[in-house]
Amino acid sequence: MPSQRRLRIYVVLVLIVVVYILYTTSDARQTRSQDFYAKTVTAMNAKQRAQADADNAEINQKLKKAENAAKNAAEGKLARPEGVAGVAGDRILGADEKTVAGRKKMKTTAGEPEAPLVLTEEETAAKKKADTEKEAEREVDNELNGILKRSPIIIFSKTYCPYSKKAKRILLEKLKIVPPPFVVELDEHPLGIGLQFALQKSTGRQTVPNVLINGKSIGGGDDIEDLDEGGLLVEKIRSMAGKRVMEVGRRPVS
């Protein structure tokens, strides 16, 4: 039977072995954990870098496409390729073709002037009508300006209108005016309708009579009658006509 001393030695040796085994096992496990963590972090970083590189590559590709598109658009505005005159829809026109406001294509020969614009029938008719109206309007304006120079007092009248007859009787028979008022019978004038519309625009009156002093309307037949009966007509003519009227007054009653 072993002695107690030997038994103690065996126990101590066993404890030393157990402690050594536990220590080495724990160290190995810790080393493996550290290696796993390091590999995991490295893999995650690599994946993030790869994703970032892919995103950057995609962004750079989009920017390059946008830059090329803008450059091509700018170059297309500055100059077309030789032998290309324009684009109609998806078809490239030849150098001898030219679009005309989306209506017709006209061919031109090198060295020759471009062919004139071709209008549709409706556009031609509308343009002709507009030109005719403008010409008629100019003619009316010129005629009206010429009439206003004939006398400081103009009576725009119609031969059959009783109010026109009343205004003419007062201004031509009851009053003596030098120079005398100039009468325009719109129903007999070749531009009578146009003159009447022009008077409506300039004076606000379309009816007759329309009495103007130095181009300003003083009204119609009833207005002239009211001024005459109130004793204000002579003074109004003097004040509005100024020096253009040399004499104005009532004629003596015979």
Image (cartoon, grey):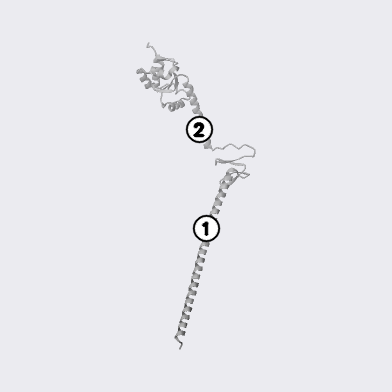
One can see residue 19 in this view: yes
> Which of the pair 137/56 is nearer the observer?
56
Q: Is residue 127 above or below residue 26?
A: above
Report the side of 15 relative to 73 (left or right). Answer: left
Residue 147: x %, y % from top left? 47, 21
In space, the residues marked 2 and 1 are separated at their CA atoms by 67 Å
Q: Is residue 249 above or below residue 67?
A: above
Q: Among all residues in the image, which is located at the extreme left? A: 230
Asked whether the beta carbons under mark 2 and mark 1 sit within 8 Å of each other, the answer is no
x 52%, y 37%: residue: 123
Residue 77: x %, y % from top left? 57, 43
Local crowd size for mark 2, using a 10 Å CA cut-off: few (<14), some (14–19), many (≥20): few
Q: Which quadrant is home to the C terminus?
A: top left
x 50%, y 27%: residue: 138
Local crowd size for mark 1, using a 10 Å CA cut-off: few (<14), some (14–19), many (≥20): few
Residue 135: x %, y % from top left? 51, 29
* Residue for badge 1: 52
Residue 239: x %, y % from top left? 41, 19
Between discs 2 and 1, the one toward the N terminus: 1
Q: Among all residues in the image, which is located at the extreme right? A: 111
Q: Secondary structure at mark 1?
A: helix
Quadrant in which residue 167 is drawn? top left
> Which of the pair 220/214 is nearer the observer?
214
* Residue for badge 2: 130
Q: Among all residues in the image, which is located at the extreme top? A: 254
Q: Is residue 201 above or below residue 21?
A: above
Q: Amino acid at mark 1?
A: Ala
One can see residue 90 in this view: no
Residue 123 numbered mark, or none: none
Q: Is residue 202 above or below residue 254?
A: below
Quadrant in which residue 241 is drawn? top left
Q: Amino acid at mark 2?
A: Ala
